Image (tube, rainbow, N blue to C red):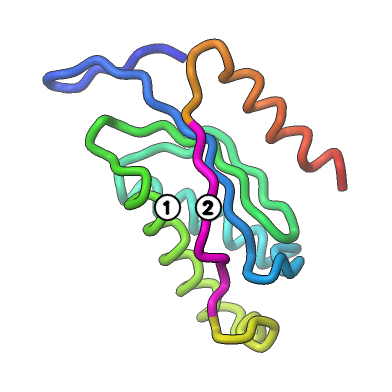
Amino acid sequence: MEPQRGRNSVYNIAYHMVWCVKYRKPLLTGRVAEHLKSLLYQVARDNGFTIEMMEIMPDHVHLFVRATPNHLVASMVKALKGVSARFLFKEFPELKKELWGGHLWNPSYYVGTVGHISEETVKKYIESQKAGD
């Protein structure tokens, strides 16, 4: 992971983020999963951070994200989850019928910082998630 340069800073910030579908329902498959991927990449671009790697599992999402010192983790997760839920419900209204209360995502999430030494470990872990299907 090469350090990035800002106007007033040099930084190397990366996160492993994970969140689940409400009730761990396996709804993220097929066209829903593909549309979710494109939505998440778009949200990241629109908000100035980068998704380096992504794996969509049927009931949860793994991301490896690079950000600047100006990005708050909670704000990035809120944008990713909020925008994706809104657009997925619009594109696939049948999802709401599967989820009591009309919420796509569980309100909690996991985030871990990724240092230089453990970057490959996190990437291999995310890659291995799909192999476990």
Amino acid at dot 1 = Val
Question: Is disc 1 placed on a helix, strand or loop?
Answer: helix
Crowding at mark 1 (Cα within 10 Å: few <14, some 14-19, many 20+): some
Identified at 63% across, 86% down, the residue is 100
Stretch in magenta: 103-112
Q: Residue at x 42, y 66 (%)?
A: 82
Give the number of the disc on residue 77.
Answer: 1
Measured in 3D between alpha carbons, the distance from the residue under mark 1 to the one under mark 2, in whole angstroms, is 8 Å
Q: Is residue 33 above or below residue 114?
A: below
As helix, strand or loop, the secondary structure at mark 2 comes to: loop
Q: Quadrant of residue 23?
A: bottom right
Q: Position of residue 86 (x, y in %)?
A: 46, 74
Q: Nearer the viewer, residue 108 or 26?
A: 108
Residue shown at 40% from the left, 54% from the top: 43
* Residue 19 location (% of width, % of height): 58, 54
Coordinates of residue 18 in the picture (x, y in percent): 58, 47
Q: Nearer the viewer, mark 1 or mark 2?
A: 2
- The total of numbered circles placed on residues is 2
Q: Is residue 108 magenta?
A: yes
Answer whether labels 1 and 2 touch (C-beta < 8 Å): yes
Disc 2 marks a residue whose amino acid type is: Tyr
68 part of magenta stretch: no
What label sits on residue 109 in the rendered view? 2
